[in-house]
Amino acid sequence: MGKCTFKGGVHPYDGKELSKDVPIKELFPEGDMVYPLSQHIGAPAVPVVAKGDRVLAGQLIAEAGGFISANIHSSVSGTVKAIEPRTLATGGKCNSIIIENDGQYEEVEYVPKKLEELSRDEIRERVKAAGVVGMGGAGFPTNVKLTPKNPESIDYIIVNGAECEPYLTSDYRRMLEESDKIVQGLKVALSLFDHAHGIIGIEDNKPEAIAVMQKAVENESNMEVKVLKTKYPQGGERSLIYATTGRSINSSMLPADAGCIVHNIDTIFSIYMAVIEGKPLTKRIVTVTGDGVKNPGNFYVWLGMSYRQLLEAAGGVVGEPEKYISGGPMMGFAMYSLDVPVVKGSSSLLVMKEDIVSKVETSACIRCGRCGEGCPSHLLPAKLAGFAARNNEAGFLKFDGMECVECGSCSFVCPAKRPLTQQIKSMRRTIMANRRKK
Ligand code: SF4
Ligand code: SF4
């Protein structure tokens, strides 16, 4: 079978051997649970509970604050203790609902349904009610993604099983352990479109997952597994669309403009849970890994519990780790506190004995061109970083700086260790903020 790929990309050490063979373990949270009202792109959710209210697991505690927004549910039973700003893994603060967990895990009554019983509107409504958002980190409300302007033009629903970020193994474990629910989630998504075809894209460094998923789709006439070449950022939306369909999109287009909708593995699983089992999004898989963790593994986590408890469940740290990262090493962000909640977009806690990045010394650009060769968006990162350093917006725009997907490949390959991604990212933020002001 030919392997699908894209132009550019890099090959970082993947570190997946640390946790890939550790089955998913469910964790029961203790103590207070924290539910930030912004766990998605768009307007914050609006609380529908007040201090002192008793809530059940699965109960709606905050409802979508706009069209681009998402509902939030309690993952435990207990009492609302406060609604106040709390620190997030990113370091910022966000108004949050705090629930004192009573340890009973009393749940609301869920209403399961068969796919055949539901109209398309009812399916979208169940996805919306369950608060499902893109769980790869983007946090875009899934019901909005499943409601494109021209539904008849959707040709492909692509499930992102690439998991190209080094160290992360949660999608891999989900594919091995719950392939049937992934297929059912994809079936639900496909049922919303007249002629869409399902593609599950998996990198070729995961042969077991490829075999399991191929078996799971063997009787599905409108689904297939596509084997992707292992290369970072193969799971980036644009790279994945190109690799699996040959179609290209840019920053001014949505995947739907190219007839595609992309969902990550956990999101498609959550679509199944919402529509068929009637359960809201209150749990996700998080990989806890790195050479600074005693027992790396994959955990099924109640949203709202703290990263500290997650780390304890993995046996705690080895020595005195220098770096904690939420997400993967390429696109994740450094954490300065573990007393922050796991949210819908939390994929991993990576603990590293050594903070290599802060120790590298930057030197002058030697014009080797490696950053351009590795860029999946075919940009000239050295040039763009130069414009960013001089705050030259016109030059940055002329050389398509807004097409950067902030994947980190250019910084990774640069022999002079120049902070290319950081500079480009910061210029992009400034331009986007200026555009919003106008
Ligand atoms: S961070 Fe941006 S400029 Fe650098 S390689 Fe990725 S897409 Fe290209
Ligand atoms: S990879 Fe680094 S040294 Fe090479 S051209 Fe790009 S910025 Fe310069």
Image: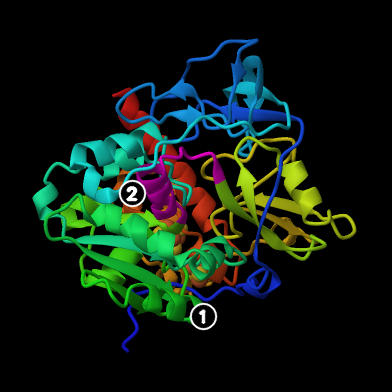
**Horizontal and vertical percent for residue 239?**
34, 66
**Horizontal and vertical percent for residue 390?**
46, 45
Q: Is residue 415 above or below residue 404?
A: below
Q: Quadrant of ligand 1?
A: bottom left
Residue toward you, 408 or 371: 408
Q: Is residue 405 visible?
A: no
Q: Is residue 396 visible?
A: yes
Q: Quadrant of the N terminus?
A: bottom left
Magenta highlight on residue 274: yes
Q: CA distance from mark 2 to mark 1?
A: 37 Å
Q: Relative to 379, is 260 on the left or the right?
A: left
Question: Which residue is rendered at x = 65% and y = 61% of the image?
Answer: 362
| Residue that carries the numbered disc 2 in the rendered image | 402
Give amino acid for label 2.
Answer: Met
Label 2 environment density (alpha carbons within 10 Å; few <14, some 14–19, many ≥20): many
- What secondary structure is marked by label 2? helix
Q: Relative to 137, is 86 on the left or the right?
A: right
In primary-sequence order, the first of circles 2 and 1 is 1
Q: Relative to 47, is 306 on the left or the right?
A: right
Write down the region rendered in magenta. Answer: 266-283
Labels 2, 1: front one: 1
| Residue that carries the numbered disc 1 in the rendered image | 208
Question: Which residue is rendered at x = 90% and y = 59% of the image?
Answer: 319
Residue toward you, 13 or 267: 267
Q: Quadrant of the C terminus?
A: top left
